[in-house]
């Protein structure tokens, strides 16, 4: 944790991002904190005339109120990145033991992409942290008896991730926890749906006051607009270019070595799952396969900041590889 804090906050004022989006978001946070006003919607999507949810702005505004610094919005991102270190530790402990938890915490602490994101602003930049929390809640729900507040929280966090950035849609497979709740399936579904709905209340207020703006434009995009941004890719480019480059950025080592470590971690967690040492391993792998295939057939652009929800799973597989070695 100390290593992670040092790497994220060292020489912090000289490292923060001041691009046009970050500057605009910081001004929104400043105005919201001064006027004590909360917006009903968030930034526009780059894919279509659709707005995301307002929770991203809420984070910045609340940070501006609570943290006595002009850098408050950026500091809130750095703190959320530090939080991910502890979350990955808990995930490793729940899956196997404390040793794996410490390995995952260290990998997260020194991850170049997490260090970089901690000094910038962007509504997609906390998707890794939100995904880590969702996986943590997911494992808690499977390992423990029925806990209503955890089911509500899981639905809320998945809805929150989608509110932050639409890549959060690929976190909905974590509702597969309902498979383990056969005796209370409908009650568990209700509580998770309730949490999901709660996360959308602010955006629903925006829709009701603006002639269903996002609903109409989302429909237009699905019918016609998505054709304008089609990117043709093959399995060859997807496997040989996109994934090695992504792993290189997240882990911070040679892309071919990173790919080898990733594959070794996938094999090792599969082996431990087969031996029933890691009970939830196959479930996590199944969710990853769904996300993996969807990304291959996604017609829009695949950029690093569009797949930040994958960071915790990448840390997880790298951690299993190191643990096995």
Image (cartoon, rainbow, N blue to C red):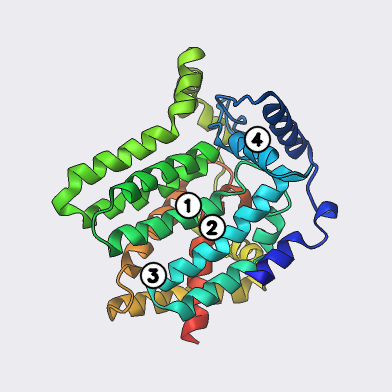
Sequence-first disc among 1 and 3: 3
Question: Residues under labels 4 and 1: Cα distance?
Answer: 36 Å
Along the polypeptide, which appears first: circle 3 or circle 2? 3
Figure quadrant of residue 86: bottom right
Disc 1 versus disc 2: distance between alpha carbons? 7 Å
> Which residue position holds label 3?
94
Which is more N-terminal, label 1 or label 4?
A: 4
Q: Which mark is residue 238?
A: 2
Q: Can see residue 303?
A: no
Disc 4 and disc 3: Cα gap in Å?
A: 34 Å
Disc 2 versus disc 4: distance between alpha carbons? 38 Å
Q: Nearer the viewer, mark 3 or mark 2?
A: 3
Foreground tag (2 vs 4) = 4
Marking on residue 296: 1
Q: Which residue is mark 4?
A: 61
Residue 3 percent across, percent down from the top left: 68, 71
Instruction: Find out whether the residues at labels 3 and 2 contact each other: C-beta distance under 8 Å.
Output: no
Dot in front, 1 or 3: 3
The N terminus - image quarter: bottom right
Asked if the residues shown at circle 1 and circle 3 are in contact, with their CB atoms under 8 angstroms apart, the answer is no
Task: Find numbered disc 1 in the image and state the secondary structure of the residue it sits on.
Answer: helix
| x 50%, y 62%: residue | 87
């Amino acid at each position: 944790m100390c290593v992670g804090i040092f790497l994220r906050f060292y020489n912090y004022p000289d490292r923060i991002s001041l691009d046009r989006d970050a500057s605009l978001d910081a001004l929104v946070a400043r105005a919201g904190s001064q006027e004590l006003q909360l917006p009903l919607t968030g930034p526009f999507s780059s894919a279509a005339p659709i707005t995301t949810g307002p929770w991203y702005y809420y984070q910045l505004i609340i940070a501006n109120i609570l943290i006595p610094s002009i850098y408050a919005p950026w500091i809130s991102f750095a703190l959320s990145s530090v939080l991910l270190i502890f979350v990955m530790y808990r995930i490793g402990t729940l899956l196997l033991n404390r040793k794996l938890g410490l390995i995952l915490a260290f990998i997260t602490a020194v991850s170049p992409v997490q260090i970089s994101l901690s000094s910038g602003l962007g509504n997609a930049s906390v998707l890794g942290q939100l995904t880590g929390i969702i996986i943590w809640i997911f494992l808690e729900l499977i390992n423990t008896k029925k806990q209503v507040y955890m089911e509500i929280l899981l639905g809320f966090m998945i809805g929150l991730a989608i509110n932050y950035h639409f890549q959060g849609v690929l976190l909905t497979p974590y509702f597969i926890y309902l498979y383990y709740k056969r005796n209370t399936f409908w009650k568990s579904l209700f509580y998770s749906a309730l949490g999901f709905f709660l996360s959308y209340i602010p955006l629903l207020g925006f829709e009701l006051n603006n002639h269903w703006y996002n609903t109409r434009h989302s429909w237009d995009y699905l019918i016609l607009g998505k054709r304008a941004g089609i990117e043709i890719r093959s399995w060859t480019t997807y496997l040989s270019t996109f994934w090695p480059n992504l792993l290189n950025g997240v882990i911070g080592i040679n892309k071919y070595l990173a790919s080898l470590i990733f594959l070794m971690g996938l094999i090792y967690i599969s082996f431990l799952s087969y031996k029933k040492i890691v009970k939830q391993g196959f479930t996590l792998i199944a969710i990853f396969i769904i996300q993996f295939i969807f990304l291959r057939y996604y017609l829009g652009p695949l950029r690093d900041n569009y797949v930040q929800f994958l960071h915790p799973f990448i840390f997880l597989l790298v951690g299993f590889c190191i643990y096995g070695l």
